[in-house]
Image (cartoon, rainbow, N blue to C red):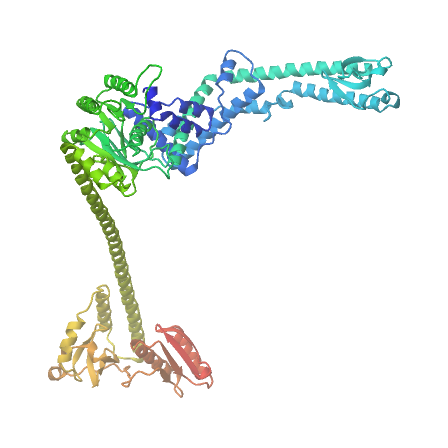
Amino acid sequence: MDTKILKTLEYPKIIHRLSQHAATSLGKTIAESLQPVSDLESVKQILQITDEAYTADRLKGSAPFGGIVDISAPLHRARIGGTLNPAELLDIANTARGGRRVKRHISVLHEDNSIPMLHHIADQISEHKSLEDAIFDCIDDQAEVMDSASAELASIRRELRNGESRIREKMDQMVRSSSVQKMLQDAIVTLRNDRYVIPVKQEYRSHFGGIVHDQSGSGATLFIEPEAIVAMNNKLRELKAGELREIEKILQKLTALASDYVEDLIYNLDLLGQIDFAFAKARLAHLMKATQPRMNDRGFLKIKRGRHPLIAPEQVVPLDVELGNQYTSIIVTGPNTGGKTVSLKTIGLLSLMAMSGLFVPAEDGSQLCVFDAIYADIGDEQSIEQSLSTFSSHLKNIIRILGSMTSKSLVLLDELGAGTDPAEGSALAIAILEHVHAMESRIVATTHYSELKAYAYNRKGVINASMEFDVATLSPTYRLLVGVPGRSNAFAIAERLGLARSIIEHARGEVSEEDQRVENMIASLEENRLGAETERQTAESLRREMETLRARHEAESLRLEEQKEKLMQKAQDEARETVLKAKREAEQIIADLRKLAMEEGASVKEHKLIEARRKLDEAAPELQKSKRGASKTATKQVKIEAGDEVTVYSLNQKGTVVEVHGSDATVQLGIMKMKVALDDLELRSSGAAASKTQQPKQAASLQRTREENIKMELDLRGENLEEAILEVDRFLDEAFLSGLAQVAIIHGKGTGVLRTGIQQYLRRHSHAKSFRLGNYGEGGVGVTVVELK
């Protein structure tokens, strides 16, 4: 890509921003050398890497690049046999450890959220834990070789510390001596040339032996090494020389170890730079609120609310433009300062960014094309040195573009044909546009010439566009309107500013009839556009409202359907439980009756009990609505009398009417009698007809029923325990069938035998849920209150 065109479209400024987001010098170097790519598959791959880094950065933040530096120079020196210093070795260890952390970070991310391309890059990073440990065992965080680096070094440094301590003790004794203190400038011990000395006054030089190493600026003080410690200082000098030799041996050993991994470490640097570069692109995308564009290589681009990335977000006006589908050329007309040049640069810069693997500041769904080249002629190219006018410099640039472009190129021309005679300039502009259009290149051009409006209007594959201008405020809105040519608005502006109407009308008369028709056509198009825009906004509002209502309706329907299913399931469960409960209770009643019949010698037939159980089993699983409603009507139309055979709906049992009183009837059900509402009965056969053919069946001797209404208390005072138990059983059956929740059994206080026997019986009775003695006002210990199931 031409460097000059990249600069024209302000691509280097984007690269500068990108490099600032790199965490390492490795990533920064890659960012600064970034260039657009012209291969579709390559662009898709680098965009995918950016997308993976964008996802990783959003979920877990950037990778940990701390400690990673460019160690290529020290590695090269280690490879050719040089010895590295402690700081360089520490950088190698930190970079190796940092690479291991980055690899682990991306591996963990990949397990939770698939980032295959980043994971593939990070997985190639080689780990050298042994090298890291060897260096960290010898060199501390301040890049100093530690005593523990070798036993010899530890011994030398121990002797050094002991020697220094002895020298200081010796010299401290000297400076504290009264005979020596008078000869000293200051009672201190200091260093000169790595040897311990004391400051002696000049006049006492002859009285003080030793070696002079330095003197003060005035010459009044001499820094003398006393004879008594010369040998000790010499020994110290020898130890320090030995220390340096041992450190050199340690550094050579570590350098040799690092040289074994030079190729791996250099490759790691490249991989870490790529990962840092990917995260830099991700951070730039977050900053610009950019999205990933869809890419193609068929010359189609569709930018949805695209923003120039170098204009402040609160000032930029979004751009909507489509090129390469129904039309391959866009001619943008309109006055200056309307934003035409910014629109051109936005189209070119976003295309370059996408071709470089960067997200673009536009809405989701934007599409951009991978062009083989992007050419631009934008701005004033006048050259004083070459004596070229504005027109000449533009034309020279255009000639170069026309000679280089292909059918897969994007051409951006600003102020086409400007700088010369309007008639000739417009004709030349049309000819250039026609040539580019014939080459099938994609072109966006801006111009002032009204002749180009008519050209675009009549030419297939070419469309007019303009920058919107608000005549009411006399200011541009910077919105690109595709399909509507620009108007000069000169007369409208002049009228708004107060120019006399007569002058304006005279000026209108000077405009040619053809130009007037073009302006009228544009005015009509503008009016139609505004109307269509209003209708579109209304339709869009209605569409959003309908979508909201539809979504709400669907949600409500789904909720009601779910509620209906839950209620149906609940009703079925409750019905099943009710039937099972009734079946269990009926079984218990039958068992109790069989027991009583056996005890009292009653004539209850066993086969009748089996038949009753069979009917219960047949009735249990149906859970269907009975046809009670239809039968009730029929029942009401037929008079039920004593002796009639009927069916009790609520119990699904057949019985015989014993007595009818009001709206109720006493019905014989096997060995039991119970009071039932007439609405709960269905006539099966009349008793009068049945009496002619058969004699009434004799009831079991255990039958005893109360024909009056069911009471809530039973008085057993004066009865023996056996009779009382039978009365309690009958009373509880009637109370249970009548739906009573609580009843009272009066047994009196007496000796307590009756109370104890009744309560023991209640503990195993199937209808009794719980029982208690009466409270104050209920009869106290003379009454047992029973709560029914």
The quarter of the displayed image where residue 366 is located: top left
Q: Position of residue 77 (x, y in %)?
A: 51, 14
Foreground residue among 9 and 618? 9
Residue at the spot 25% in from the left edge and 17% down from the top edge: 399
Foreground residue among 169 and 431? 431
The quarter of the displayed image where residue 619 is located: bottom left
From the viewer's perspective, is residue 381 above or below residue 326? above
From the viewer's perspective, is residue 614 above or below residue 391? below
Residue at the right extreme of this rendering: 179
Q: Position of residue 144 (x, y in %)?
A: 61, 23
The quarter of the displayed image where residue 111 is located: top left
Q: Position of residue 286 (x, y in %)?
A: 39, 36
From the viewer's perspective, is residue 771 above or below residue 105? below
Q: Is residue 769 left or right of residue 74?
A: left
The answer, for residue 12, to whether it is visible in the render is yes
Foreground residue among 215 and 344? 344
The answer, for residue 275, to whether it is visible in the render is no
Q: Is residue 95 left or right of residue 591?
A: right
Foreground residue among 565 and 180? 180
Query: Could you tell me how many numbered marks the image carries?
Result: 0
Quadrant the C terminus occupies: bottom left
Residue at the spot 12% in from the left edge and 84% down from the top edge: 688
Quadrant the N terminus occupies: top left
Residue at the spot 19% in from the left edge and 44% down from the top edge: 532
